[in-house]
Image (cartoon, helix red, strand yellow):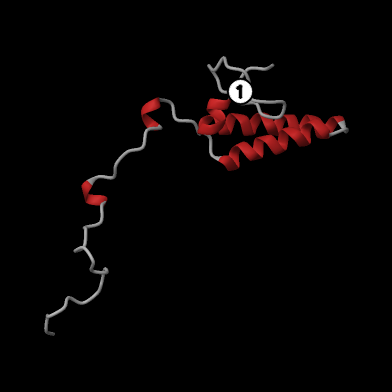
Amino acid sequence: MTNCAIPGCRRDAAGRHQPFCVDHYFQLPKPYTGLVTRTSIECSRAEDPDIKQHLQEQLAGYIKSVAAKLPSSGAATAPQAAPDSARRPASAPGVAAGAPKQGSLL
């Protein structure tokens, strides 16, 4: 098996057309991993040497770009709570937002 394409990772890649280990695969956004997988499959099926070379270069660029999307530390992947200023104020229970209060006169 080959090693994960992420620099510094020594784990095995997840599969024939997947250059990332399982941990990195699930840290990446699905559209990026799908693009890399599709390009890898297309590259392996190419018969023309020029097209194959082009796809290999394109795949290397995609992998480099995708690797840059990974957070550099574990702290960046942890979900963070929104600051108090970003939270919506809680409305009174049972009252729909924007509904007029009962008993108030215009």
Q: Quadrant of the C terminus?
A: bottom left
Would you identify the image quadrant in which residue 61 lies?
A: top right
In this view, the residue farthest toward the top is: 10
Query: Tag 1, which secondary structure?
Result: loop
Would you identify the image quadrant in which residue 96 lies?
A: bottom left
Give the answer, above or below, for where 56 lies relative to 88: above
Q: Position of residue 14 (x, y in %)?
A: 64, 25
Would you identify the image quadrant in which residue 26 lies?
A: top right
Q: Position of residue 44 (x, y in %)?
A: 79, 30
Q: Is residue 86 left or right of residue 71?
A: left
Q: Which residue sits at x=38%, y=31%? A: 76
Write down the residue under mark 1. 5
Q: Is residue 85 left or right of residue 59?
A: left
**Type of amino acid at the residue the image marks with label 1:** Ala
Q: Quadrant of the N terminus?
A: top right
Q: Nearer the viewer, residue 48 or 28?
A: 28
Q: Position of residue 72 (x, y in %)?
A: 43, 26
Q: Position of residue 74 (x, y in %)?
A: 40, 26
Q: Which residue sits at x=59%, y=39%? A: 32
Q: Nearer the viewer, residue 94 or 21?
A: 94
Give the answer, above or below, for where 95 lies relative to 18: below
In this view, the residue farthest toward the front is: 94
